[in-house]
Image (cartoon, helix red, strand yellow):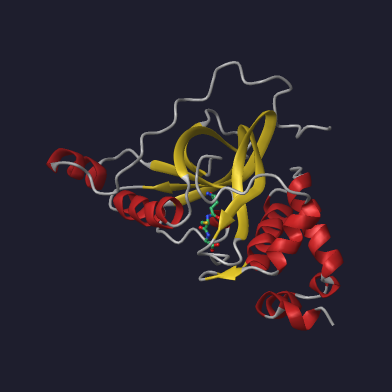
């Protein structure tokens, strides 16, 4: 399979850093509190799913780029944001995959933004979504970017109770079509991620993502028409089946 040109052919020589300790949003003491709030060091948060188009927290800057050694997969179930207990939706997580790359957005947070963003993401990703935190090396797409940036990433591992694991792209598309939750329809989640990749990372490959989008459009052909029809179908998929 052709690899993304940015990715190494062989596995990265150095193993990834150990998983980040679970970050408690409230600093433990005065010193930590002051450091977090007034510390000059920024924290970078890497998003590769809904975070690329709906971060939901304040940030100082953001960069498009990639992390090595992972593939993005719609293998995490979601019974809150894009699904329900009865009809879980499917959202993305990362699968360790030597030689692969996952493209997304890294957000720089500083000062007061740090505790606020971590508290918000702890609730959205960990408590409601079943994701764990890990530290990874983020490679900005700018050609003149020297060093990779250490970033925090939220990954749903197979051990979390909402993990669904592999399925055919057709079955994943069919599950997405019938799922919606508090944040909106699962169709919107898929299409906005595909739109982000086409617009901001046109050079990147993501066969899994675009195969699911293709399967979804073959089931709901109206989706390839206009933005309005996408909104319309996302809010009322039964009607668009004709
Ligand atoms: N951690 C990934 C995936 C995040 C994700 O999609 N998490 C779900 C939680 S189940 C979410 O935040 N959904 C909000 C939404 O769908 O708008 C990322 O960095 O983007």
Residue 157 in sight here: yes
Please say if 143 is above or below 54.
Answer: above
Residue drawn 78% across and 75% down? 226
Examine the rendered structure and indicate whether residue 182 appears above or below residue 37.
Answer: below
The residue positioned farthest toward the top in the image shown: 13
- Quadrant containing the N terminus in the rendered view: top right
Residue 151 in the figure: left or right of residue 50 = left
- Depth check: give the residue in front, 176 or 72: 176
Percent coordinates x, y for residue 232 in the rendering? 70, 80
Quadrant assignment, res 141? top right
- Residue plotted at (70% across, 44% down): 166
The residue lying at 70 percent from left, 62 percent from top is 175
Residue drawn at point x = 78 percent, y = 52 percent: 169
- Percent x, y for residue 121? 41, 53
Q: Is residue 150 visible?
A: no
Q: Position of residue 105 (x, y in %)?
A: 56, 48
Given the current orientation, which residue lies at the most extreme front position? 86
Is the C terminus in the top left, top right, bottom left or bottom right quadrant?
bottom right
Work out whether residue 117 or residue 41 is closer to the camera in this orientation and state it.
117
- Looking at the image, residue 146 sits to the left or right of residue 232; the answer is left
Q: Position of residue 3 (x, y in %)?
A: 78, 32
């Amino acid at each position: 399979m052709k690899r993304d040109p940015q990715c190494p052919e062989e596995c990265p020589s150095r193993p990834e850093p150990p998983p980040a300790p679970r970050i408690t949003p409230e600093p433990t003491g005065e010193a930590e509190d002051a450091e977090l709030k007034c510390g000059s060091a920024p924290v970078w948060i890497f998003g590769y799913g809904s975070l690329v188009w709906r971060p939901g927290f304040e940030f100082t800057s953001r960069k498009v780029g990639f992390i090595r050694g992972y593939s993005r997969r719609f293998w995490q179930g979601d019974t809150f944001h894009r699904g329900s207990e009865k009809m879980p939706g499917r959202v993305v997580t990362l699968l360790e995959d030597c030689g692969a790359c996952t493209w997304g957005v890294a957000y720089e947070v500083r000062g007061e933004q740090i505790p606020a963003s971590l508290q918000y993401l702890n609730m959205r990703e960990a408590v409601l979504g079943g994701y764990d935190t890990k530290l990874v090396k983020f490679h900005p797409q700018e050609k003149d970017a020297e060093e990779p940036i250490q970033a925090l990433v939220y990954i749903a591992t197979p051990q979390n109770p909402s993990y669904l694991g592999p399925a055919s792209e057709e079955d994943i598309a069919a599950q997405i079509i019938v799922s919606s939750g508090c944040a909106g329809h699962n169709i919107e989640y898929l299409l906005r991620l595909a739109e982000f990749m086409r617009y901001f990372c046109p050079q990147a490959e993501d066969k899994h993502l675009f195969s699911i989008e293709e399967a979804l459009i073959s089931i709901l052909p109206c989706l390839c028409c206009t933005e309005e029809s996408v909104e319309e179908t996302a809010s009322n998929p039964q009607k668009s089946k004709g």
